[in-house]
Amino acid sequence: MADVVVHDRLSAAELLDLAPAEAERIDVGKAPKHHRMTQDQINALLVERGLGGQVVVRLKGGDPFVFARGSEEVRALAAAGVPYEVVPGITSALAVPAYGGIPVTQRFSSTSFTVVTGHEDPSSGDGTVDWAAVANTGGTLVILMGVERWPKIAERLLAAGRSPDTPAAAVRWGTRPEQHTIRATLATLADHPMESPSVIVVGSVAAEDFNWFEGRPLFGRTVVVTRARAQASAFARELRTLGAAVIEAPTIEVVEPSDHGAALRRAVSAIGSYDWLVLTSPNGVARTFDLIPDARVLAGVKVAAVGSVTAEAVAAHRVVADLVPERFVAEGLAEVFPAPPAGGGRVLLSRAEVARTELPDALRAMGWEVDDVAAYRTSPAAVGPELVERIAAADAVTFTSSSTVTNLVDAVGVDRVPPVVASIGPITSATARKLGLEVTAEADPHTTEALLEALVAALSP
């Protein structure tokens, strides 16, 4: 378990999220002409923390020993007597072209590749790379950190005999959602707006365009996910698979109800006295089943679940829901709920502390005795100023409940909500419209899978 994560600017945010929440994160990222720390300072930091007995993860983009100064860092650690291990990564020289749809070798045309840095030690003057020799190696050239010196590099490659028509490409921010690929020739690549960090590929393979990464349906789009953090990860993962950059902005936290669960504990202790257990969300399922020691205590008690996701959460406890309405809303359950037996019957409704009254009102009107018990409570989660700015610049936002809508609008204001609003269902949509938002897409059925499909349709050209 890491105590400290020392990371550079090429580290993916998702990797940082894997670190323990309590781990200190130190950004030592270097951009052209702007260093938060010098290399000597980074070395000293690693030594200091290591000698202090902390578990330090030095997170670097690519492979630490391929033009990444990893050898300098481990040399400093070794000299100070700090134990360390190296976990090799996949060098950007291979990963970035692959994400740009460029194979660095092909059996019938490019049977070798050469990796060379375009950013040498400044003390070397014009540099130590023999570009004439590099040009004559044949095969594919992969140039790292070469944007600033590219015009001079291209000039030397041309002077050494490389054809001006040789395909060339530059892949910026490779493997990340903001990736951008420029395809040109050795003679014309410099005519395009190139920026760091980019990997430059020269050779016949640079004309290939196996567009598997940038061609995904949500590539280049930024989507805000407002679910509670514990529930957001799977949905965010699906969005990333489709190419989106995801901003996880949990606007709600799931916490204990105001009575700390006392009412739910009493109800569950007498679960056998109820005819039905009604659950309206996975959160309610989790809190309720935490108090059920053995599923056999539900013998004779039927279970109703609002929505397929809630039913799946019940099934995870080896209990099959007896009733799941086709419409995944409270009104949908009320429409198909059976009448009580002769003499009346009892329903335990386990759900959020603050919820609409339509379902218990409808069940009582049918003759059921309903115990409406708070299993959990949602409270607003803090949204910091930096996150507000990122949300305002996003392309779309997804809402999975009315509380996520209300809390986001309270946090950022109506004018800073992204232009495309995707809602999980009519109740959530109604809340959004009431607060002044225009709902672009609504899931049908009201599941996260359908929400994803509706979002893709809304963001498609």
Image (tube, helix red, strand yellow):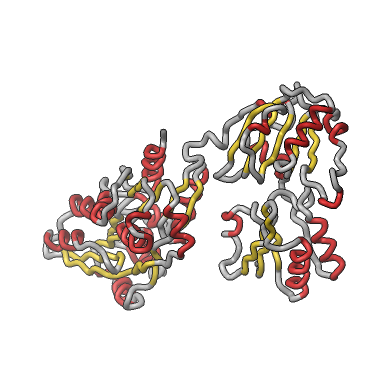
Please tell me which residue is depicted at 82% across the width and 27% down the height of the picture.
Answer: 159
Please tell me which residue is depicted at 59% across the width and 66% down the height of the picture.
Answer: 20
Q: Is residue 395 left or right of residue 410?
A: right
Q: Is residue 103 left or right of residue 326?
A: right
Q: Is residue 213 visible?
A: yes
354 to 52, vertically: above or below: above
- Residue 364, image x, y percentages: 14, 63
Front residue of 245/82: it is 245
- Residue 10, image x, y percentages: 65, 52
> In which quadrant of the rendered view does residue 110 lie?
top right
103 to 286, vertically: above or below: above
Please tell me which residue is depicted at 78% across the width and 74% down the height of the picture.
Answer: 51
Instruction: Name the quarter where the N terminus is drawn.
Output: bottom right
Instruction: Name the quarter where the C terminus is drawn.
Output: top left
Front residue of 404/367: it is 404
- Residue 403, image x, y percentages: 32, 61
Q: Is residue 18 left or right of residue 238?
A: right
Front residue of 340/283: it is 283
> In which quadrant of the rendered view does residue 104 lie?
top right
- Residue 131, image x, y percentages: 84, 35
Please tell me which residue is depicted at 70% across the width and 41% down the height of the picture.
Answer: 147
Q: Is residue 323 visible?
A: no
Count numbered badges in the picture: 0
